[in-house]
Image (cartoon, rainbow, N blue to C red):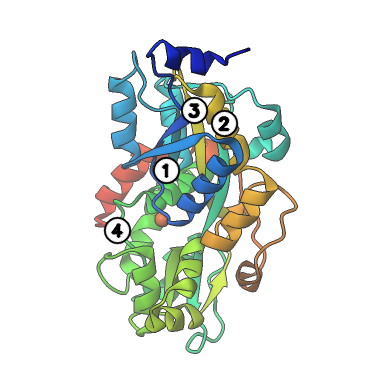
Amino acid sequence: MTRSFTSILFALGLSAHAAEVRLYSERHYDADKKVFAAFTEKTGIDVKVVKAGANELIARLKSEVNAPQADLYITTDAASLTKATKAGLLTPLKSEIINKQVPASLRGKDDTWAAFTMRGRVIVYAKDRVKGNLPKSYQDLASPAYKGNILIRSSSNKYNRSLLASLIAIDGKAKATKWATGVKKNLARPPQGSDRDQVRALAKGLGDFAVVNTYYLGLLEQSSNEEDQKARAAVKVIFPTSGDQGTHVNVSGGGIIKGAANQENARKFLEFLVSEEVQKLYQKLTSEYAVVPGIELEPLQKSWGKISPDRDTIHVMGEHDQEAVKIFNFVGWK
Ligand SMILES: [Fe+2]
């Protein structure tokens, strides 16, 4: 009779760990639970999650560097993945599957992370009120033509920080400062609330233009609240460009923790996230964009129009993140 290693351990009274992958994740979407359950069903590997902000998770990873308590670090921001890489917390993915599925522009330069979803930061406008004179670029938002008419959240939020960081990368610090000054002058009200709140305020007539991440339009659409559905229906989407660059995008991505106990499971998990099955599922459940080329968009995503993502600045946002914070403070964008 042959006995498995596990059953021998049991017979000896030693417990073998059940197969698991431990995530430190910044994501907070219900859809993830469905994806985790599908992974466990397919592989038998349990998914354990600790959720917190990116910086808090990095601090934890640093404090646990000699005995990592997580196998995979997941954030909603490329700058945080770059930061974790620079801190030496991540180890190369070394996955042929990921290399095949995910374009190099959506993977870390040192192979320390890969994106699994992408979101655009776009402009929406009140389709019934705005006739013509639409902004085409992020730079246009600073034009006096939009005075008192722009809704955008606080600068402390990283979606705005990464947008400004990308503008610093593209236009330089001086122009980016001028831009932030101009947009601040054009605000319809002091920055407040979430991305969804900007769309809600727009629907109420507080301003005609709002800056929002694409997937929030999907979340408003799927909301059980009728007001939210109406707010979503009141807007049309502009995919702004930035000079020669396309629309500002950021990613959700993951990297394997150096020295983690379940690195192989972490790799399998990331590979699962970039499988066509899960890529389609994310587009459906969260309205985020697939990172794998050739996945057909969901009808709502198609209704927004075509996105040309700026994949270049994803890799340098981390370098300009602190500069962006300084500029926001300097111009008094709360
Ligand atoms: Fe978000």
Residue 288 can be seen in this image: yes
Q: Label 3 vs label 1: CA separation?
A: 48 Å
- Which mark, by number, is residue 162? none
Q: In this view, does 197 lie to the left or right of 122?
A: left
Q: Residue at x 54, y 76 (%)?
A: 134
Mark earlier in primary sequence (4, 1): 4
Question: Which residue is at 41% across, 46% downward?
Answer: 174
Q: Relative to 10, is 115 above or below?
A: below
Q: How crowded is mark 2: few (under 14 residues within 10 Å), some or many (20 or more)?
A: many
Kind of element beneath mark 3: loop
Looking at the rendered structure, the secondary structure element under dot 1 is: helix
Name the residue: 69% across, 48% down.
276
> Residue 205 in the image: x percent, y percent?
36, 85
Amino acid carrying label 2: it is Gly
Q: Mark 4 points at which residue?
A: 154
Amino acid on which disc 3 is placed: Ala
* Comes first in the chain, label 3 or label 1: 3
**Which residue is disc 2 drawn over?**
108
* Distance from the alpha carbon under mark 4 to that under mark 1: 20 Å
Which disc number belongs to residue 19?
3
Q: Nearer the viewer, residue 275 or 216?
A: 275
Q: In the picture, residue 313 is in which quadrant?
A: top right
The quadrant holding residue 260 is: top left
Q: Position of residue 47 (x, y in %)?
A: 45, 38
Q: Is residue 245 shown to the viewer in this render? A: no
Is disc 4 placed on a helix, strand or loop? Answer: loop
Q: Mark 2 and mark 1: span between their CA atoms?
A: 24 Å
Q: Which of marks 3 and 1 is in front?
A: 3
Q: Which of 212 and 73 is in front in this view?
A: 73
x then y, percent, for residue 51: 34, 42
